[in-house]
Amino acid sequence: MTGKLIMAFIVSFAVSALLGKIVVPWLRRIKAGQAIKENGPTWHMSKAGTPTMGGIIFIGGTMAACLSTGFSLMLEGDYGHILVLALSLAFGAVGFIDDYEKLKKKQNTGLTAGKKFILQVAVAAVFVFALRYFGYLTPNLYVPFLGVSIKMQEWLFFAFCIFTVVATVNAVNLTDGVDGLATGTSMPVFLFYSVVAFFWGREFLSLGIFAAAILGGLFGFLIYNYNPAKVFMGDTGSLFLGGAVAGMALSLDMPLIILSIGIIYILEVLSDVIQVGYFKLSGGKRVFKMAPFHHHLEMGGWSGKKWSEKELFALFTGITAIFVLISFIGVYGRYAV
């Protein structure tokens, strides 16, 4: 079992690292440059023209690892990793359309919020139904740390799961605002999923392979995405990543674990919601210098210290790693063998 997880990581890392050498120059040649929001930090304007849609690098690595390392499991009828991969690819496709629209318009606005939301809800609904149909998901809401499950009505549970998927996808997308940030904060998350799958036994091997594959892909992608970034993952990558984070939590039948392992994603979303809400209620006042929260820190926060992109990468990744460790303690005994 350990060998398959390690192999999935290695294959994905190698493919992603190699793809980056091909994809980044190709994106430059086709002028797939990122347009930067004018209302963002002024120093981000220097990033204009940096290739976007780089998420196809780790998506390619993940697919290669899942299809090769997980092939023997598919022959046995275990398609858990393929289900989560399909969800992630569907969200990645939505992100690709959004990225394409941005490039076509030469500005940082792609699909309308309404269209994107409808597509995301549709993808999430199909996935939740598939997980329930194949027995990966039960209407018993597992509560980490307490070790108890709460029986929910089917319709309510379905609605909750769809909300969880869509919210997580958009939270990860918001976190992708600084070089390497979404990449770095997601690596401990998929390490968590890999380790949990390993300790829970062979029944969860295929899901562990998917998690290890994404982890390897992100390490390979980080070569090109770390500050100063040679390529951005774009919505193609961040929506794929968000789908994978949510998909793994639901496939392991513990959606609430996102509250702890995804603490940074939640912080980013809450900062955005608080900023917009307070701005409207107060008639133009702000809680943060800029939202989401990483921009607040970039601009000096409340202390006046301006955090560099490398410092933000280390801070957010470190915080995620700590919460991942705590989360593992909270779920380790559920199916431990």
Image (tube, rainbow, N blue to C red):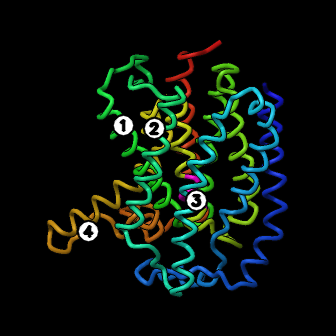
Residue at image mark 3: 92
Majority secondary structure in the magenta region: helix
Count the numbered circles shown.
4
- Please tell me which of labels 2 and 4 falls first in the chain: 2
Residue at numbered disc 4:
286
Mark 3: which amino acid? Gly
Element type at mark 1? helix
Q: Amino acid at mark 4?
A: Arg
Q: CA distance from mark 3 to mark 2?
A: 19 Å
For residue 335, which quarter of the picture? top right
CA–CA distance between discs 2 and 1? 8 Å
Asked if the magenta segment contains residue 239, the reply would be yes
What secondary structure is marked by label 3? helix
Which mark lies nearer to you, 4 or 3? 3
Query: Sequence-wise, which precedes: disc 4 or disc 3?
Result: 3
Q: Position of residue 26 (x, y in %)?
A: 77, 77
Q: What is the x, y in percent for residue 284? A: 20, 74
Front tag of 2 and 4: 2
First in sequence, mark 3 or 2: give its number: 3
Q: Secondary structure at mark 2?
A: helix
Q: CA distance from mark 4 to mark 3?
A: 33 Å
Q: Are marks 1 and 3 in contact (CB under 8 Å)?
A: no
The residue where tag 2 is placed is 129
Question: For the residue carrying disc 1, how many other residues have a C-alpha within 10 Å: few (<14), some (14-19), or many (20+)?
Answer: some
The residue stretch that appears in magenta: 237-241
Find the distance from the CA under tag 4 to the CA under tag 1.
Answer: 36 Å
Which residue is disc 1 drawn over?
158
Q: Amino acid at mark 1?
A: Phe
Q: Nearer the viewer, mark 4 or mark 1?
A: 1
- CA neighbours of label 4 inside 10 A, class few (<14), some (14 to 19), many (20+): some
In front: mark 3 or mark 2? Answer: 2
Q: Quadrant of the N terminus?
A: top right
